[in-house]
Amino acid sequence: MIIAKNLVKKYDTTCALKDASFTVEKGEWANIMGPSGSGKTTLLNLIGCLDTPTDGSLLVNGIETTKLSQKERTKFRRENIGLVFQQFHMIPHLTALENVMIAQYFHSIEDEGEAKEALMRVGMGHRLHHLPSQLSGGEQQRVCIARALINQPGIILADEPTGNLDKKNEEAVLDIFKGLHNEGRTIVIVTHNPEIGRIGEKTIQLSHGEVECVT
Amino acid sequence: MKSLWVRKEKFLIAIIAIMLGAAMVASLLTISLDIKEKMGKELRGYGANLIVLPGESGYIDQFKPEHPAIIGFAPFLYFKAEVKAKKIELAGTDFKAAREMNPWWRIEGVLPGPQEVLVGINVAKKLELKTGDSLSIQTQYLNTGSFKVSGVLDTGTSDDDKIFIDFENAKQISGKNGATSIQVSVLGDIEGVISYLEDKNYKVKKIRQVAENEKALLEKTQLLMSLVAFFVLCAASLGLLSTMITSILERSREIGLMKALGCGNNRLAAIFLAEAGAMGIAGGVPGYFIGLLLAQFIGLEIFDMQVSLKPEVFLLTIAASILVAFAGSLLPVRRAISIDPAVILRGE
Ligand SMILES: Nc1ncnc2c1ncn2[C@@H]1O[C@H](COP(=O)(O)OP(=O)(O)OP(=O)(O)O)[C@@H](O)[C@H]1O
Ligand SMILES: [Mg+2]
C-alpha cells in the first residue's frame, strides 16, 4: 500500500511535484499519466526510494520512506520494489541470465535455477545466454521484468515499459504485468498509452507537477 | 560475482605500471635486507682491520712485527688443490690465532690439530663431508695422506667455500714457503701501523674501509632505488586512477542501475576495491619475480654478492602493490558512490 501526502519535489529552479496526494491499495494496478515534463518519472522515483522528496510524507508498505537514511532506502528498495525502465537498462557484457542473477546477488545470494524460472515465465527460457545486444527490444524488456520479479517484491514500478516496443511486444509485456497483477502484486505504471490506462483500477493524472485527478 | 568486472585489457597499462613498481620494491627490499645482512656479517667479521700482502717477495715467510698497536695477527696461505676430484680453495692458517681474530666463526666440531682440517659449510655440502670423515688432498707436488675432518665452519662469508688446514701442512702440500696474506688486528694508531708495515715493503689493505665503502655504495643504491620505486608507484597509482575514472564514467549507467537494483555503497566500494586488489596482485606477482632478477643483477654487478630469496619480501611486495592499487582507486570509488541512480536512469 502506498500513501502519499502533500509530496513536493523541487529541483534547483523547477518544482517537479507539488502537493501530490493519493493512495494506491495493496494489489492495485495504478497508472500514472500526464504530458511530458509533468513529473511522472519524478513521482515514480520517489515511490521507488531512488530519490527523496523535498517535503511531504510517503508511506510505502507501512514505512515512512522519507525518514529513511540512504542506506536504509537502498535496503528498502532491494526488498520491496521491482523496477522496470523504458530504456531497459541492462548490463551490456552480462548475459540475460546474469542480468537477472545480479539482482539476486545484491539482494541475497544467486540462485541460477530460480533465475532461469523467472526468465521462463516471461517467455525468455530459450535466450538465457544471449547478451543484451543479441536481443530485441521486447526481449530485453522481458528480461528486465524477470529481473524486477526475481526477489519477489510486493510492488512493481514501471516507467513507460512499452514506450520503446511495437504493438506485439507491448501486448506480450502487458500480459506479463496482468499475470503479476493477478498474483496480487501492486503495480504502478507510468504510461502515455490510453489502452493501458484502461486496464488499471486507478489512474493518477498529473499536470505540471500537480495531481489533477485520481480515477 | 566476477563477471561484474570490466575487461582487464583496459587496465593493462596500469597493471604494467604496478608491475614495474613492484619490481623496484622487490629488488630494493631484497638488496636492502639481504646484502645489508651479509655486509654486516663481513663488517662484524673483520676483527682484523688490516690485511698485509706480500710485496715483491711473493710470500711472507718471517712476519714478526714489533709495533705496540698490533694486538694480533694470523697468517693465511691460500692455494688450490684437488679434493675428491674437485678443485677446492684451501687456506692454511694458525688456527689459534685465526680463531681469535674471527670470533664469529661458528664451528660444528673442534678446531683441527695437525693432519686435520676444518671444512667450510658450502664445501661440506658439495663434497658430502661431515665431521669425522677423512679426505686426501692432491696438488701437483704430492698426493698427501688422509686428513680427518675435525669440524664444519659456518661464517656466512666466502670462507664457507674453503677448507682450512694447519699452516705447516699447507706449506708442505702447496710447496710454498710462506703466507699469501696476513690478517692483522690493530688497536689505536692504525695509520702508524700502516706506514710501519709499508716501510717493511709489505702491501697493506684496510679491511674495514673496504667494507665501509661498500656500505656507502649500498646506501646510495638504496636511496636511488627508493626514489625510483616511489615515483614508479606514484605513476602506477595515477595511471590506475585515470583508467578507473574513465571506466567509471563510461559505466555510470551500469553503476546507477546496480544501485537501483539495491547495491549499497559498501558493496559497490567492495566490488571496485576487489577489482583494484586483483589488479594489484596481477601486477605484483610478476613484478616480484622481475624484481628478484633485478636484485640478483645488482647484487652481482655492484656488490659482487649472490642475493638469496627472502620470503617476507614477497609478502611485502604484494602488500605494497595492493596498497598502491587501493590508493589509486579511492577517488574513483568515491566517484562511483556519488553517482545518483535517479539522475542516471532518467537518461534519454
Ligand atoms: N535532476 C533534475 N534536475 C532538474 N530538473 C529536473 C531533474 N529531473 C527532472 N527535472 C525536471 O522536473 C520536471 C519533471 O520531470 P519528469 O522526468 O518527472 O517528467 P515526466 O513526466 O517523466 O516526463 P516524460 O514524459 O518526458 O518522461 C521536468 O520539468 C524536468 O525538467
Ligand atoms: Mg519520464
Image: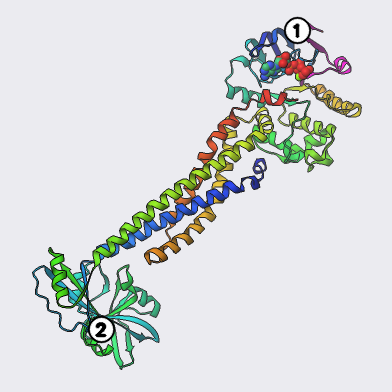
Front residue of A88 and B17? B17
Residue at 64% from the left image edge and 45% from the top image edge:
B10
Q: Secondary structure at mark 2?
A: strand
Q: Does mark 1 fall on the same chain as mark 2?
A: no
Q: Is residue B307 left or right of residue A63?
A: left
Q: Position of residue B71 (x, y in %)?
A: 12, 69
Q: Quadrant of the N terminus of chain B?
A: top right
| Above or below, B226 relative to A182 | below
Residue at 13% from the left image edge and 72% from the top image edge:
B196
Instruction: Tell me how far mark 2 sits from mark 1, CA to CA.
Output: 109 Å
Ligand 1 shows up in which quadrant of the image?
Answer: top right
Q: Secondary structure at mark 1?
A: strand
Q: Which residues are magenta?
A: A185-214
Residue bearing the label numbered 2: B116
Front residue of B228 and A53? B228
| Three-letter amino acid code at the position of disc 2 | Glu
Q: Position of residue B321 (x, y in %)?
A: 50, 47
- Indicate whether residue B205 is drawn in magenta: no
Q: Is residue B110 left or right of residue B134?
A: left
Please report, as a chain letter, where disc 1 is located: A
Residue A26 visible here: no
Q: Is residue B126 left or right of residue A28?
A: left
Location of residue A131 by image quarter: top right
| Three-letter amino acid code at the position of disc 1 | Val
- Indicate whether residue A204 is drawn in magenta: yes
Location of residue B206 by image quarter: bottom left
Front residue of A182 and B133? B133
Q: Position of residue B300 (x, y in %)?
A: 41, 66
- Mark 2 vs 1: CB contact within 8 A: no
Residue bearing the label numbered 1: A211
